[in-house]
């Protein structure tokens, strides 16, 4: 009888031991999983906070530049004006592309977009919409569609007004020597290049001829030697 009780007790004790071990194992697994999850979330929050620190740092650098702390912002904004300059079909045919580009490069302006285009009449009609009622308009369209043009965007301080001075008067015979039209051509209907006449028109013309993705943004290595 007492032996049977002892065996039963042993059996019960064994079951208890098993349950206790199971409980212990479960608690160990729970503690481990909890620790792992906590460590993961700590790592995540550290990464997020370091990212936000980086962003804060970037913002503060931009702010310093914007406040003009080192004069960089004012230099950047004054040098960001853009003009649409186009070498017309006669300029391309007469191999004057290099000479015209050279003048803008030498002046210190920065080339930010360029392509050769056989322009459709529709595009030129939009480009010259302010001249649509002029008697020479059909001749102008014929001239401008007679071959490829070299379309460019030049950037720099007062590039619109200065570009116009560099081109010279519309009628080449009235253009000063030293200007592009003054040096390279004779007739108003063969005046080899176009330049935007206002900042507003420049932006309108640039958006007509170029997709934003075709215009490059870069700091020229000459920047600090051109701008004080
Ligand atoms: P611009 O090119 O100097 O800005 P605009 O008056 O805008 O001069 O005229 C656009 C273009 O139309 C000129 O560059 C020239 O090729 C052409 N053009 C202007 N006036 C005449 C003209 O009287 N006869 C023929 N073509 C002209
Ligand atoms: Mg014009």
Image (cartoon, rainbow, N blue to C red):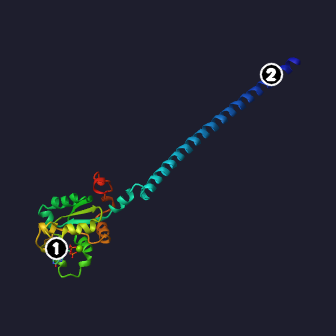
Element at label 2:
helix
Seen from the viewer's position, the closer of residues 59 and 148 is: 59
Q: Which mark is residue 203?
A: none
Seen from the viewer's position, the closer of residues 166 and 27 is: 166
Tell me residue 127's x, y (percent): 26, 72
Seen from the viewer's position, the closer of residues 69 and 111 is: 69
Q: Residues within 10 Å of mark 2 (few under 14, many from 20)?
A: few
Q: Residues within 10 Å of mark 1 (few under 14, many from 20)?
A: few
Rendering quadrant holding ligand 1: bottom left
Residue occupying image coordinates x 64% and y 38%: 34
Tell me residue 164's x, y (percent): 23, 69
Per the model, the C-alpha gap separating discs 2 and 1 is 111 Å
Tell me residue 24's x, y (percent): 71, 30
Q: Which mark is residue 10?
A: 2
Query: In the rendered view, does 26 fall on the left or right side of 134?
Result: right
Element at label 1:
helix
Q: Nearer the viewer, mark 2 or mark 1?
A: 1
Seen from the viewer's position, the closer of residues 55 and 61 is: 61
Q: Picture quarter containing residue 140?
A: bottom left
Residue 47, placed above or below residue 94: above
Residue farthest to the right, as pictured? 1
Q: Picture quarter containing residue 101?
A: bottom left
Tell me residue 94's x, y (percent): 11, 63
Check the picture and name the quadrant holding the N terminus: top right
Residue 29, placed above or below residue 120: above
Q: Earlier in the sequence, mark 2 or mark 1?
A: 2
Residue farthest to the top, as pictured? 3
Disc 2 Cβ-to-ligand 2 distance below 8 Å: no
Check the picture and name the quadrant holding the C terminus: bottom left
Looking at the rendered structure, the number of numbered marks drawn on it comes to: 2
Quickly name the residue at label 1: 142
């Amino acid at each position: 009888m007492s032996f049977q009780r002892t065996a039963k007790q042993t059996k019960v004790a064994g079951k208890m031991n098993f349950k206790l071990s199971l409980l212990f194992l479960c608690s160990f697994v729970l503690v481990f999983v909890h620790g792992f999850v906590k460590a993961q979330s700590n790592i995540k929050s550290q990464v997020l906070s370091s990212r936000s620190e980086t962003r804060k740092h970037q913002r503060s650098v931009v702010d310093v530049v914007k406040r003009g702390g080192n004069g960089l912002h004012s230099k950047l904004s004054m040098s960001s004006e853009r003009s649409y300059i186009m070498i017309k079909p006669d300029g391309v045919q007469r191999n004057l592309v290099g000479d015209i580009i050279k003048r803008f490069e030498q002046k210190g302006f920065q080339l930010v977009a360029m392509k050769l285009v056989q322009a459709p009449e529709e595009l030129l009609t939009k480009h010259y919409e302010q001249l649509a009622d002029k008697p020479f308009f059909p001749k102008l369209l014929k001239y401008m569609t007679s071959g490829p043009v070299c379309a460019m965007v030049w950037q720099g301080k007062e590039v619109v007004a200065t570009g116009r001075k560099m081109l010279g008067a519309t009628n080449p015979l009235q253009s000063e020597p030293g200007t592009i039209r003054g040096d390279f051509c004779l007739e108003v209907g063969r005046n080899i290049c176009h330049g935007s006449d206002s900042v507003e028109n420049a932006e309108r013309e640039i958006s007509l001829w170029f997709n934003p993705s075709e215009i490059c943004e870069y700091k020229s290595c000459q920047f600090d030697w051109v701008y004080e």
